[in-house]
Amino acid sequence: MQLHPFRPRLVDAVRGYDAARLRADVAAGLTVGVVALPLAMAFAIASGVKPEQGVVTAIVAGFLISALGGSQVQIGGPAGAFIVIVYGIVERYGLTNLLIATSLSGVLLFVMGLFKLGALVRYIPVTIIIGFTNGIAVLIGLSQVKDLLGLSIDKLPADFFTQIGVLARQVHTLNPVALAIGLSCLALVVVWPKSYTMPLDNIGWRHRLYRLAAHVPGTIVALVLATVATAMLNLPVETIGSRFGGIPQSLPDLHLPPFSWDSAKQLLIPTLTLAMLGAIESLLCARVADNLIDAPRHDPNQELMAQGVANMVTPAFGGIPATGTIARTVTNVRSGATSPIAGIVHALTLLAVVLVAAPLALNVPLAALAGILLFVAWNMGEWREFARLRQFSVQYRTILVGTFLLTVVFDLTVAVQVGLVLACVFFIYRMSTLFRIEPRELAEAPAGVQVREVYGALFFGAVGKLEALPAQLPEGTHALVLDMHRLIAMDTSGLDALEQLQRTLAKRGITMLLAEVNEQPRSLMRRAGFEAHLGEQSFAPTLAEALQRCRG
């Protein structure tokens, strides 16, 4: 098997690169960098780690994913989809083991890309993706209730029902000031202008103001206003400074997490979960980006290798899992990005902010970040799909709702495993219903000759229909012709059923002939020796030829 070559999209994107594209990429990178700052801190805090770990992830992983990835404009970094997973790993295994699991998932992602397994991610049914995405969105929203209400809870448990119980018992500690800040930030982000393009003719001062405001991210405006109000009015709310002591004004030293085979075996499930979710999110994001730009489509295998490198390196700086982020990627495109240079500028912008303005984060209220994350969670979910469920089959509804509930109540790994099993079972059922054996009444058929036309795929889920065929033949039958030109595929179980049919018919003195057998079934029969067993005279190129042989 030929391995996938390591060739970042950046190599091809910079060909013919000019000053105009550079200006566009720098402007887009600066915009996305500003957007990414509050999200990186919020995602880290919601994941149960320090805010600087989210910022470091956005810097290191964001740089590597853009520089080495297979997408033209994708932005990488900490993602909302990882919040629930990372929080659960930290709760159960500790921070050190989270870093180890992240590095191991990076190795797995790189190997997946190297062996060209990027296309396999596309085989996950959309019902499962919608189900677990909506489930993660619900869990993110629930995790922010504590900071939004300013409740006096040291640490939330990871279990869904336990979280609800703890929040209900502590609701009497509600902080009205924190609630007011959180709701104000949420409302501001919701109503803040987001469209950069408006008609240029007859623009009044309101339209000019709208377009100017649209270039400033609403999350930054909400965060700055909440921080200034907290600092100037000395509001009694919890801040980044009061909980974490602030954000260091530098990148952390390079430090490899301790590794042992015992810990690696213990972290098998978390590693697989992080790798699977990272692959799904990054390739979904890359597909979204492809639909927004006029450029070559992304290389899924190169993208997975870049994600792998990023997740292998980032834990050495204390970072958390990273993947492609849809919201920041869309912002990048709308800001005019033309190449991966924009993503590199976004990472350098975040680095400059850390080096220059890290002390300003001391007074950022956690309630403001909770309000921003509630907005992210709402946008993350595809809630319209629930309203459309009645338009789809019972199987579709079962998979989507089942995956959603399992994600919320148990965890993502269980939800995806059960969802895939259900999808396979339903797919087998649907395929088996498509397989048919129908009688054909032909005037030219000699007496005692029965003709049956076979439709669909003869596989393990449909062999029962073939096994029931002998009992359906009338008395006096001495030959059975199977017209197989509509049989598109057959597996070994189907071949075994066909062999059993031939033996059963032979015991009753009935000859079986096969007409117009397609290449795949014929090849399987040849390799298994069934063709030689029947003899060439049992295979006819046409139905008419088969009937002629019956007359003979």
Image: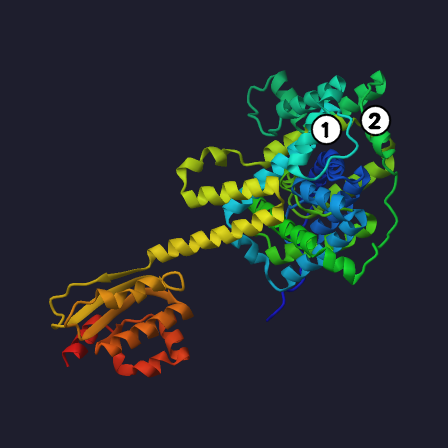
Camera-side residue of 203 and 346 = 346
Picture quarter with the N terminus: bottom right
The quadrant where residue 523 appears? bottom left
Residue 357 coordinates in the image, percent (x, y): 85, 33
Circles 2 and 1 in contact, beta carbons < 8 Å: no
Can residue 239 be seen in the rendering of this structure? yes
Mark earlier in primary sequence (2, 1): 1
Residue 481 vs residue 241, the one in the foreground: 481
Q: Position of residue 204 (x, y in %)?
A: 60, 17
364 left or right of 417 in image = right
Q: Secondary structure at mark 1?
A: helix
Q: How many marks?
A: 2
Q: Residues within 10 Å of mark 2 (few under 14, many from 20)?
A: many
Vertical order, 374 against 133 (above or below): above
Q: Residue at x 18, y 69 (%)?
A: 450
Image: 200 above or below 72: above
Tag 1 residue: 146
* Three-letter code, disc 1: Lys
Q: Amino acid at mark 2?
A: Asn
User: Disc 2 vs disc 1: which is toward the camera?
Assistant: 1
Within 10 Å of disc 1 (Cα), the crowding (few <14, some 14-19, many 20+) is: many
Q: Quadrant of residue 447?
A: bottom left
> Relative to 33, is 112 on the left or the right?
left
Label 2, secondary structure: give it. helix
Tell me residue 293's x, y (percent): 57, 44
Query: From what the image shows, is residue 291 above or below residue 499?
Result: above
Picture disc at residue 363: 2
Q: For the point 76% across and 20% down, which residue is it? A: 175
Where, quadrant-wise, is the C terminus in this rendering?
bottom left
